[in-house]
Image (cartoon, rainbow, N blue to C red):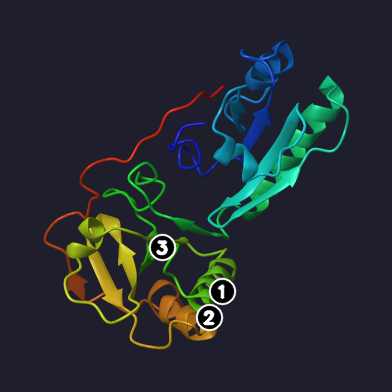
Amino acid sequence: ISGSFFAKSDTEPKVIFFTDRKSVPPLMKALSLEFKGRASLGIVLRGASDAFVKQFGISKRPALVHVTDDEPLEFMRFEKDFEWGQVSFFLSRAVGRHRSGSMCVLRELTSDRLNPENCGPTASQFCVLHFSDSASMAPAIRTALRQLAKMVCDYPVKVFFVAGSDFAREFGALPRNPVVLYRPKRRRFKAFDGDVTDAQALFSFVDSAVGGGAPLPKLLKNDPSFGRRRGGTGSEL
């Protein structure tokens, strides 16, 4: 699994198959074709990094998981026999769950994820950005942002946290624990000046602009970027 696997497309659920083989089993090859364009299927072969495997508590292979959130890591494990019908049903359920909730989660905005779907320069939707890495983010802030993501699920808004100073630099001086509402296509943004642990206050801030038409007063000179891309190595179906 490469570093870009989780960020490849937020429109598709991420499902990972762990095998003790050195090559992709025929069942998973066939299912990758069956679900092409609907689900992203990754494979972890024998000999893959133990650290990655241990994150999922895998002690026996084959194993299959649907990753419902990658930061922090949350997943659902396949518990049935590895037969076509059972695995296909699990993947279909993953697709359905993802379609109903893919817009309603807090994710990390990375160089791999930055595209027209997710706050890229041509994106027309709004982005709520909190500038912090995962390790240093206060639990109360994470909770508030995750609540906000669910509250704005029906809005043209996505909620991200952003690590690294390159992307944040374009926004200039910001308050401590900064949260901004940003519209990439217009390069306009507004910084939140309230309590970032208060999900309702964050929602009112977003709603005033997205639902109420309040202006985003500040204009960026340049499109923000991450500089050097962060990549990874691994196999993907």
- Residue 83, relative to residue 174: is it above or below? above
* Circle 2 Cα neighbour tier, 10 Å, few/some/many (<14 / 14–19 / ≥20): many
Q: Could one spot residue 12 in this view of the protein?
A: no
Q: Nearer the viewer, residue 27 or 94?
A: 27
Name the residue located 51 percent from the left edge and 65 percent from the top edge: 155
Q: CA distance from mark 3 to mark 1?
A: 12 Å
Cβ–Cβ under 8 Å for marks 3 and 1: no
- Residue 185, relative to residue 139: is it above or below? above
Q: Which mark is residue 199?
A: 2
* Residue carrying label 1: 143
Name the residue located 19 percent from the left edge and 73 percent from the top edge: 218
Secondary structure of the residue carrying numbered label 1: helix
Name the amino acid, label 3. Phe
Quadrant the C terminus occupies: top right
Q: Earlier in the sequence, mark 3 or mark 2?
A: 3
* Residue carrying label 3: 161
Q: Earlier in the sequence, mark 2 or mark 1?
A: 1
Name the amino acid, label 2. Ala
Q: Residue furthest left?
A: 221
Q: CA distance from mark 3 to mark 2?
A: 15 Å
Cβ–Cβ under 8 Å for marks 2 and 1: yes
Name which quarter of the figure residue 113 lies in. top left
Of circles 2 and 1, the one toward us is 1
